Amino acid sequence: MSLLDEEGNQDESLESKTLSAEDQVKDHSAGTRVVAGQIFLESGKSDSQSENEENFHSREEEKENSLEELNSLEMSNLLNKDLEEAEIQSPVLTAIGGTADGEPCHFPFLFMEKEYAECTADGREDGRLWCATTYDYKKDQKWGFCESEEQSNKRRQMQEAEDVYQIGMKILNESSKKAQKKVAYQYLLKAADMNHTKAMEKVSYALLFGDYLKQNIQSSKELFEKLTEEGSPKGQMALGFLYASGLGVNSSQAKALVYYTFGALGGNLIAHMILGYRYWAGIGVLQSCESALTHYRLVANHVASDISLTGGTVVQRIRLADEVENPGMASGMLEEDLIQYYQFLAEKGDVQAQVGLGQLHLHGGRGVEQNHQRAFEYFNQAANAGNSHAMAFLGKMYSEGSDVVPQSNETALQYFKKAADMGNPVGQSGLGMAYLYGRGVPVNYELALKYFQKAAEQGWVDGQLQLGSMYYNGIGVKKDYKQALKYFNLASQGGHILAFYNLAQMHATGTGVMRSCHTAVELFKNVCERGRWSERLMTAYNSYKDGDSNSAVVQYLLLAEQGYEVAQSNAAFILDQKEASIVGENETYPRALLHWNRAASQGYTVARIKLGDYHFYGFGTDVDYETAFIHYRLASEQQHSAQAMFNLGYMHEKGLGIKQDIHLAKRFYDMAAEASPDAQVPVFLALCKLGVIYSLQYIREINIREVFSHIDMDQLLGPEWDLYLMTIIALLLGTIIAYRQRQHQAIPRPAGLRPAVPQQEPPPEHQPPQ
């Protein structure tokens, strides 16, 4: 399923998901006890939490509770007051024209033996809304329009735009062919020209990224400005991105921050994520861990609530720089030939291939699109062959339900039981979920705990996660935050999103651990980066592979704003290679430097070395050997980079940015050779060069005449050293004379008497290549 296949998916993955004011209030609750979304939400403060917290926290809770009670009373009074005012000030529609101009509309009114509680267009060919001013229209014939002609025309135009938009969305969602999607976007373009807000949002992003429409930054900017004037959070966030990245406008971090803030206030999740990263890294704002925590937690709540039993989408993090440096290195992508080979094995009845392909299509990733139909077929084949893993995954699919597999607790339970009886941890975990929530069986916490423990003992992450949740909430067991922390940590090592989310909640609130804002932000950031918008990473990569660097760099730049390190390094790489024509040549290196810097601050070694290179050679900045030295040293000390060590050796050798020291140069060269086998050949050559330089330097520093004047030959070689020397010279002369005589004795024959020597072919191993 492509990124733009479904409107719901697009709202989450491409642009954002707009929140209602009520949702925002819920998500901003600092004292939330929510863990993992689907694990027993607690509506109030936990009574037993005081067992593990200090009196200070108890007093704070009492204050919060009393404030909540006061706030609820105030809200109740305000609501009652608003309702009273609404009753008093309810608007009265006045008829326009007709036979009762200026008279109030009467609701309900009777027309054609049917009562109407609102204005209607029934009975009129022009579609204008009208109402009766008395109850019985047929009897009194008193009526008037509910809207002016201008209002009517505008409403009809918007209705027409909505119809065109729905046609476009229907084609877009139902087709997987690129040609059909392009047709869909022609309908969306038409609806956008008619000022349809949702159509304008989709078209503006398509123009920005070059998705099914020709990329046009200027046109997308104009649409974003129009959307911003209408108060669209998506438009505000996108306009902030343009100002942040300097695409189509002069770069302005101040304006970007303003638009991001308005987008976040409107409920745009991507705007919240961008602000979270900016406060975390101190980009354009004062660094504030607590502010970053607020934004990241809100986004993480929505990401966690979208995680299903079958798990989230696999995020592919492919670094372009690593692919170029190490072409043979696995990028995590499966080659088409390899997929076809597995499909061949699956068709021949290979159960492991069937299960593997089933999982691949169930979750998507590694170059394979998510496809529940194919996943179901592969799991069915393997389950019929008696594979417990396939049975367990079929149970998951039936438990979750989808367009392909109807939701059925009974069928899911049968598959889970079969798999669990065979000792399969996935089946045991699924059976535990059934008993925990009462899906097809009565709720039984003891059995749920038993099956989760069995699954956890075998290292299955779902079992570990649910076991942690039971200890956290005290379900079937006594509350034990230490045990909860232990199992959440185990599940997080397996990469489970909800485990990261639960750990983040515990560190954010100081539950079972010392409160750590920094750790909580890092964990929440990890969760946020697993949202549906991460699918854009794969789309950008495919665009780059297809040769569309402009589209790829814009997509990577937006993801870089959201804090994705891999997107920051990939955007910097494309700019570094000067492959993006939409960025001016004079701006290429400074922008690349900016994103290398952001990627380096998140721990990417290549980015740190690139920063050193940029300062060493003066790319996008002034030549600064001292700064280059600092970056190389950081890469050497923190990431043990052989390249950085080699560069440090060279700088010590030449005395660049540091005092010249040949001994330290040799030490760093040796460290580079130890750190990486690939560095051994260049290190050997560098050491040879260093040896020559050292020898020349040593000879230059000493006085040859003084050395020989201080040498006592009698003491060194004995009193008859001159005889030894004369003997050696005589032997050398004799050898030379003998060699010369042998050359004169070898007289060459005349050319005509020389015997013919047949030409021989060289041995096969020495034959030149054909």
Image (cartoon, rainbow, N blue to C red):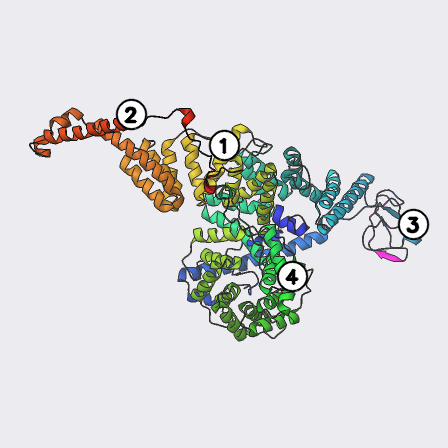
In the rendering, which numbered label is found on residue 347?
4
Label 3 sits on residue: 141
What is the three-letter code of the residue carrying label 3?
Gln
Q: Select label 3 or label 1 by which is in front.
A: 1
Report the residue at 37% width, 37% height from top.
Answer: 647
What is the three-letter code of the residue carrying label 4?
Glu
Which quadrant would residue 188 be assigned to in this image?
top right
Separation of residues labelled 2 and 3 (CA atoms): 141 Å
Residue farthest along the right direction in this orientation: 139
Which quadrant would residue 374 be assigned to in this image?
bottom right
The magenta segment: 102-127
Q: Select label 4 or label 1 by which is in front.
A: 4
Query: Which of marks 1 and 3 precedes in the sequence?
Result: 3
Nearer to me, 408 or 417: 417
Nearer to me, 416 or 711: 711
Separation of residues labelled 4 and 3 (CA atoms): 75 Å
Residue 550 coordinates in the image, percent (x, y): 60, 36
